[in-house]
Image (cartoon, rainbow, N blue to C red):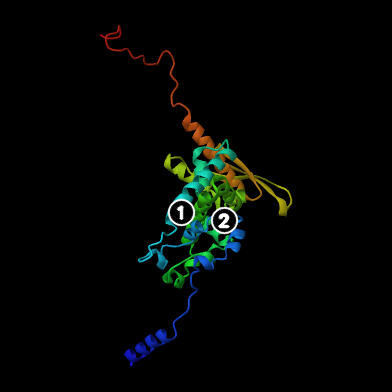
Amino acid sequence: MIIWISQIKGWLRVVFPKRYKRSPSPDEINWELLEKRLNYKIRERSIFTEALRHRSHPSCSAPENLTSNERLEFLGDSIVNFYIADFLFRQYPDEPEGTLTKMRAILVSRDFMAKVGKKLEIGEFLALGEGEERTGGRKKRSIISNSVEALTGAIYLDGGYNFAGKFIERTILVDFENTLKYEGINYKGDLLERMQKIHKPMPKFVTKRAVGPDHKKEYTVAVQVGEKTLGVGKGKSKKRAEQLASKNALDSIEKEQEKPKRKYNRKNSYHHHPRGSNGDK
């Protein structure tokens, strides 16, 4: 009975196959709509056809063996990382290398790049294999984020670095301050980790002030170890104030660690005498 039901199900799948959205061919891509989404006038369509072709698409296998978007993804990833590094370097002249690295990591992360791609609705233009179509490949974060990088590479090849940079500014950096704020660098977590690493007591977060009406309060929070204040921060929420206080505390710890551990004076300084000098005995 079970075998018979299984055979019937198999027969039904052959007669009434489940329909999945078929990937568009280059001739079927709505180029006008794509240009509108990218806010860019495409010159060489073949580059963008490649940028939208996932490796699962049948044309990437024999006999056609067309190139998938992975090479353009590699190129676009490098351009995005460089452009954002340069942007942050100029935007935050007083921030240390570690902070800039964390900021860049947020802006180029897979999660955030996927959000950018979904906002542009890139998924509907992708050329995917049936397996990816079946498993929702048009909405997969990895595929969407990689496609944004590939399209950046395509714009660079088609129009040059300035056009690629403008695309990055319009899409990834359009609201970078809020992105960094809400995607978040966890200064508080970094501080606790640093204190543990250097074998120091865990700090306490003390609310010093809360000024203003309930809907518009400003909090002042201090990070303290015993009686010593490591950093102070102000923000429109306790959480934000704690984050800024933690950042200031990390800065003060780094400055403290950069100081020389011992100051030498004439009495305790060590004078090295090279061999053969009057210092030899």
Percent position of residue 134, x then y: 45, 73
Along the line of sight, which residue is nearer the eye, 55 or 132?
55
Quick one: quadrant of the N terminus? bottom left
Name which of mark 2 and mark 1 comes first in the sequence.
2
The residue labelled by disc 2 is 42
Is 115 situated above or below 165?
Answer: below
- The residue sitting at the left extreme is 281
Judged by depth in the image, the label closer to the viewer, 2 or 1, is 2
Residue type of the residue flagged with mark 2 = Ile
Along the line of sight, which residue is nearer the eye, 140 or 195?
140
- The residue sitting at the right extreme is 213
Percent position of residue 200, x then y: 45, 40
Q: Is residue 224 visible to the viewer in this orientation of the structure?
A: no
The residue labelled by disc 1 is 72
How many numbered marks are there?
2
At label 1, counting other C-alpha atoms closer than 10 Å, the crowd grade (few under 14, some 14-19, many 20 or more) is many
The residues tagged by marks 2 and 1 sit, at their Cα atoms, a distance apart of 16 Å
Percent position of residue 125, x then y: 53, 65
Is 17 situated above or below 166?
Answer: below
Residue located 53% across and 44% down the image: 83
Percent position of residue 199, x then y: 42, 40
Residue type of the residue flagged with mark 1 = Leu
Is 52 situated above or below 231?
Answer: below
